[in-house]
Image (spheres, rainbow, N blue to C red):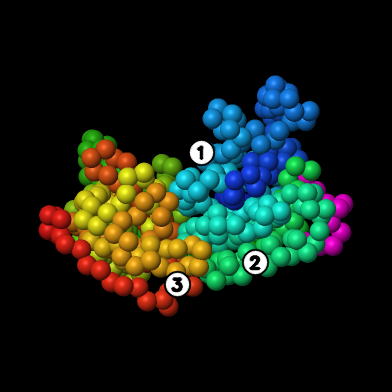
Amino acid sequence: MTLSTAEQLSATTLLRFATAGSVDDGKSTLVGRLLHDSKSVLTDQLEAVTLASTNRGQETPDLALLTDGLRAEREQGITIDVAYRYFATPRRRFILADTPGHVQYTRNMVTGASTAELAVVLVDARNGVVEQTRRHAAVAALLRVPHVVLAVNKMDLVDYAEPVFAAAAEEFTAYAASLGVPEITAIPISALAGDNVVEPSAHMDWYGGPTVLEHLETVPVSHDLTECPARFPVQYVIRPQTAEHPDYRGYAGQIASGVLRVGESVTVLPSGRTTTVAGIDALGESVDVAWAPQSVTLRLADDLDISRGDLIAPSADAPGTTQDVEATVCHVADQPLTVGRRVLLKHTTRTVKAIVKEIPSRLTLDDLSQHPAPGQLVANDIGRVVVRTAEPLALDAYAASRRTGSFLLIDPSDGTTLTAGMAGASFAAVDAQDTEDTSAEDAGWDF
C-alpha cells in the first residue's frame, strides 16, 4: 500500500534548516532579513528591535536582534545559544535554527543541525573560507545534512565583485564535496542590504541563480516513507486493566522511520521474538497503516515481554544487535571524554550502561587527517570511539537512519550530555586513511 498524495504532501511541506558560519559572518542578520522581508515578523517584535537599535545609537533596525534573544548575545553582538524560529510562506513552512559561530559553541551547531534537512553556511566575502567554515561543513557532512547552501555574505563590501564570489564558492565546494556532501549551492548575498535574500539583487546581474528564500522554497525534500525500513521504539506500555478493556495491551511510541501495517510480521529487539501487528491505534481510532513520524499505539498478536526501550521492526528488515558500538562522535561537554570512562548510552527510548573502550582517532579539520590514539576528546572535538554496552542495542548505520543510527553518551552521575554519536558515520575523504588501533584496559565494568 502506498501513501496518498495528500499524505505525502503533508510530510513534505515542512523544511527544517540551520544556519552556521564563522563569527561576524552575518548569520543572525541573514535570518533577521529573511524573516523581515518575507513578512514573518510581528509588529511588536519589529518595534522592540527598532527601540533596542535606537538605544544603541543605530539609525536603522538591527535585524540580527530578531534572533539574538539572550541578553549576553545582545550585549556582545554574538550568537551563543541556538535560536529557533518558525515561519511560513505560501509555498512552504520552515523551522530554522540560527547556530553560533564561535569555535567553543560548535557543539550548539550539532544540536541545531541534527534534525536539519538543509544547512546554510555563511562566509564573509572579504575573508573567504576559514577554519570555522570548514568545521561547520564537516559537521553538516557528518550529520548527513542532504543539502548545503554556501551564502557568500557582505558582497556589498567587495563591490559585488563576481571573482570574489567565484573563488569562495570554488574552494568551499571542493572541500565540502571531499567530505561527501551530496548537494552544494552557492549564492552571493548581502544580508544587511537585502541582496539575493528574498528579492533578487540589482547589483549582481552576473548571477542568475535563486535567492536564498527561493532556494529554500523549492529545494526538494525527500520524505519517501515507504523506502525506509520501519522502526518503532517503544516509549510506554499501556495496560488500562479496566472492566471495559480487561485484556488490552498496547505499546505506545513515535514511529522513527518507515511504515507499519496491520498483519505485518515484526521482530522485537533485542530479544529477537517475532509476532504480528494485530492493530494500530492512532488518535483514538483503529487504522490499518501508520507512518513516521506519527505517534501511535501498536497491538500485537502475542503476549510478549516488551518494555520501554525495546525496538519493534519488520522481521524482513530488522536491524542486528550489538554490544560493541563503533561511531564518529562530536564531544559537547566541557569535561573530556577519556578511555575507560563509564557512561550511559541513550539510543531512542533505551538507556544502558556503557564504557568507552577505545578512542582510535581525532579528526583534524584543516586537512581531514586523523590524529591516532589521542587518549581523550575535549569540547568540540570530532573523533572515532568504540563503546561497549551492558546490554545489546539495535542500531542502524547513521547513513541509513539519522534517528536510529544516532545516540548520546551521558554522565551517569548528573545526567550531563557528554557526546553526540553517529553509528558507523565517517567522511568519504578519510575512509581510506589508515589509523593506528589502540586497545583500552577494562575500567571495571565487565560487559
Rendered location of residue 114, percent (x, y): 47, 52
N-terminal label among 3 and 1? 1
Rendered location of residue 293, percent (x, y): 46, 51
Q: Quote the CA–CA distance across marks 1 and 2.
A: 29 Å
Q: Nearer the viewer, residue 1 or 400?
A: 400
The residue at the point 72 percent across, 41 percent down is 33
Q: Quote the CA–CA distance across marks 2 and 3.
A: 19 Å
Q: Nearer the viewer, mark 1 or mark 2?
A: 2
The residue at the point 36 percent across, 51 percent down is 378
Q: Report the residue marked by disc 3.
A: 430
Looking at the image, can residue 390 be seen? Answer: yes
Rendered location of residue 350, percent (x, y): 28, 50
Q: What SS does tag 2 mark? A: helix
Which residues are the magenta region? 194-209
- Where, by quadrant of the figure, is residue 359 drawn? bottom left
Q: Nearer the viewer, mark 3 or mark 1?
A: 3
Q: What amino acid is found at the position of numbered circle 3 in the picture?
A: Val
**Quadrant location of the C terminus?**
bottom left
Q: Quote the CA–CA distance across marks 3 and 1.
A: 31 Å
